[in-house]
Amino acid sequence: MRLGIDVGGTNTDAVLMAGRQVVAACKTPTTADVSEGIGAVLRQILASSSVDPEKIRAVMIGTTHFTNAVVEARQLAATAAVRLGAPATLAVPPMADWPDRLRRALGGHTYVCRGGNEFDGREIASLDPDELRRAASQIGEAGVTSVAITSVFSPVNAEMETEAAAILSEELPGVKISLSREIGRVGLLERENATILNASLGPLADRVLDGFEGVVAGAGVDAPLFITQNDGTLLNLDYAHRYPVATFASGPTNSMRGAAFLSGVADAVVIDIGGTTTDVGILVGGFPREASVVVHVGGVATNFRMPDVLSMGIGGGSLVRSHGEAVTVGPDSVGYRLDRRALVFGGPDLTATDIAVAGGLAAIGNRAAVEDLDREVMNGALDRIRRDIAGTVDRMKTSADPVVAIVVGGGSILLEDDLPGVSEMIRPDNFAVANAIGAAIAQVGGEVDRIYSLDDMGREEALESARSEAMERAVVAGADAATVAVVDIEEVPLPYLPSNAVRIRMKAVGDLALSV
């Protein structure tokens, strides 16, 4: 059996799965201490299912810990950003476009040193070991123990990042180092930003993941623990400690993967309505469509893989207000306090859940508490929810044609069975815990993104090189080699560069090898 857990802003969901069958599912309010909430839902599902913990072969957890830390600029470690790019990149220093609150939280330790490569691997400038040692001395004096190293075009040639990391590790024993070639894509500034964020989350990742291990072991489950990442695949704990940024936006991704699994539909719009937000994404071949533009996290531009998702502040806990004839729903929400704040649960606030109960869309709580609700307010709120979600679906579509929509999440009770621009609305069994199911069924992936010179090798040779590297990365990450296959290829000629250059991005996934 596999145990999948997904932590949302309002609820923490869990499912037990045997093969492709859902054995048990449960949902509990998310707690301020996320680990405490995971422990509670784990104990609840084991008690309700009467399953022997020894039968659980793997535990998969999706968490919002690290995204929240960046958005709220808290629990981040002081971080030194070391760029290898002088003299070519001195005009724009590291973290130049960051919000002040985040730059202050990380301490503003930036260093631009000699180094970097051209797109074809040629040196911009030679690495200067003495310069790096001087930077290391300043980093050590400042008490900084997290370092992000970024070199120009390191996805093409990583030698300088590797050499710089060796020098800094020697000068600063015990320092945690993040290398940009392992995290972001080709663009320098966005790749550097993602690497700095990753380094700043290192100490928090150690605390959080160690806490998860303790919670799982405390429940009597002796099984490997995996963390879901934002491309629908898994990280083993070693990788999760090293790359916490890979978990950003894993919640919507889990929901989309769960929606594809439950419905059997691989290409559709997914509408995931939770307690706080509604996330709308696109399934392509059973995996989330990836964002093709720069993605901002906490106001910081990044270019590592992220799902193409639009979010809005509408969910089961959204506050409903009447302003004369106008009715608003959200964006503020009672969140995980829904079971104490909503009218149907004896609370003082009118929420979207109360509207759904009053409108006969759901039978939860005390319906008598909303029987006298103004019909105009109820109808206005339901209409607002319907129009706002339909508008977001429209923004995600690539044509005006109607699309198939899969509706999941506990808050999907807010939607009736028709929506403008949607030809078919699917609400599969176990829709309320699709996110936890997505975590439980997740596979293991590997990705490569680099520029090849077709003057030096043929196109087929370049594709085969990328394919082999992507598949090898998937196996190293924990995939069963016999099941690994390429699921996505992107090939972009770069006519503005010499040497017949082409950028190839390739992704491979395989089933989890539980013996790893």
Image (spheres, rainbow, N blue to C red):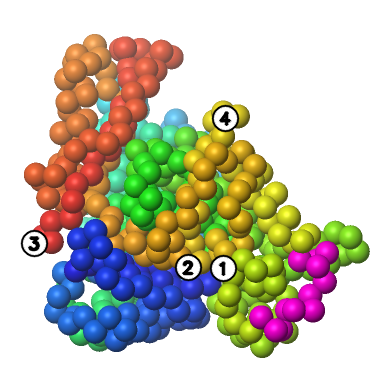
The image shows residue 192, relative to residue 100, as above or below, that is: above
Residue at the spot 25% in from the left edge and 66% down from the top edge: 17
Asked which secondary structure carries label 3, the reply is: loop
Q: Is residue 362 left or right of residue 67?
A: right
Residue of label 2: 8
Residue identified by numbered label 1: 275
Query: Can residue 53 be seen?
Result: yes
Where does the N terminus fall, quadrant-wise?
bottom left
Rounded to the nearest angstrom, the CA distance separating label 4 from label 1 is 30 Å
Of the two numbered discs 1 and 3 in the rendering, the one whose residue sits closer to the viewer: 1
Compared to 190, does 436 lie above or below? below
Q: What's drawn in magenta, residue-wise?
A: 367-378
Magenta segment, prevailing SS (helix, strand or loop): helix
Secondary structure beneath dot 1 equals loop
| Labels in figure, total | 4
Dot 2: element = loop
Which sits earlier in the primary sequence, circle 2 or circle 4?
A: 2
> What whole-number distance in Å separates the C-alpha atoms at marks 1 and 2?
8 Å
Mark 2 to mark 3 CA distance (whole Å): 30 Å
Real-space Cα distance between discs 2 and 4?
Answer: 32 Å
Mark 2: which amino acid? Gly
Q: Which residue is mark 3?
A: 515
Q: Residues within 10 Å of mark 2 (few under 14, many from 20)?
A: many
* Residue 64, position as x, y percentages in the image: 45, 65
Say which amino acid is labelled 4.
Asp
Tell which circle, 2 or 3, labels the residue nearer the N-terminal end.
Answer: 2
SS for callout 4: loop
| Relative horizontal placement of residue 494, taking residue 58 as reference (left or right) | right
Residues packed near mark 1 inside 10 Å, few (<14), some (14 to 19) or many (20 plus): many
- The percent position of residue 377, horizontal first and vertical second, equals 80, 66
Q: What residue is at 71 percent from the left and 59 percent from the top? A: 382
Tell me residue 177's x, y (percent).
Answer: 30, 56
